[in-house]
Image (cartoon, helix red, strand yellow):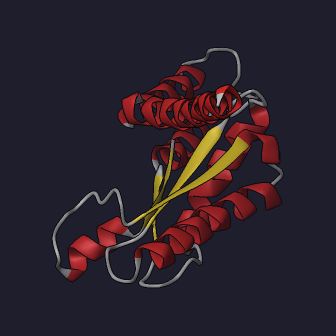
Amino acid sequence: MQTNNFYKLGMAAIFAVFLAACQSSTDDMMEEPMEEPMEEMDDSASGNARGAGNTGGLTPAQIRERDAGLATTVFYFEFDRSDLSAEAREALVHHANRLMENPSLRYRLEGHADERGTREYNLALGERRAQAVERYLQVQGVSANQLEVISYGEEQPVDPGTTEAAYARNRRVEIQ
């Protein structure tokens, strides 16, 4: 009888630890405002543009062009597609350069989908989209250690509407 109680107590403790581990990571992600990392990125980019010592011999026009590319942090996709547009690739080159210049900098690539399709399919599609951005950055020379891929599928729409325009805004990868 006492062994049975010990077994139950042990299983309950393991289950509690498992739940606590899962809960803490979810809470950390939920508490972190999505805008804050983008503000940090913008601050460091503008700090470099103001002559913070890391302009790498760029002209003011080149700095403006680089910073304009860094301002793009959301990349949109066609319906049921995960290939990058020419505009996305152009902006990602600027992000790749920034990551290579700052090896301690990390990006979280968050893939999203519109609500059409099953939850599982949309999670996989969001992941494929984020991985497409990840692969492109790695081809440009970014270390895999600087990139984290996560998919939210259809769970975090920016536009809850059911129009084609709303769906288009939800098919995206965000850099955080």
Left or right of residue 27: residue 102: right
Q: Residue furthest front?
A: 1
Please report the residue visible at 33 percent of the width from the left and 82 percent of the height from the top: 116
Q: Residue furthest top?
A: 52
Please report the residue visible at 61 percent of the width from the left and 29 percent of the height from the top: 5
Left or right of residue 67: residue 159: left
From what the image shows, is residue 18 above or below residue 134?
A: above
Q: What x and y, as percent, mark residue 94?
A: 64, 48
> Where, quadrant-wise, is the N terminus in this rendering?
top right
From what the image shows, is residue 79 above or below residue 109?
A: below
Q: Quadrant of residue 136?
A: bottom right
Q: What x and y, as percent, mark residue 71?
A: 46, 44
Please report the residue visible at 74 percent of the width from the left and 63 percent of the height from the top: 135
- 87 or 134: nearer the viewer: 134
Count of numbered tags: 0
From what the image shows, is residue 31 above or below residue 120?
A: above
Q: What x and y, as percent, mark residue 166?
A: 22, 71
From what the image shows, is residue 169 above or below residue 27?
A: below
Q: What x and y, as percent, mark residue 172?
A: 44, 64
Please report the residue visible at 59 percent of the width from the left and 44 percent of the height from the top: 108
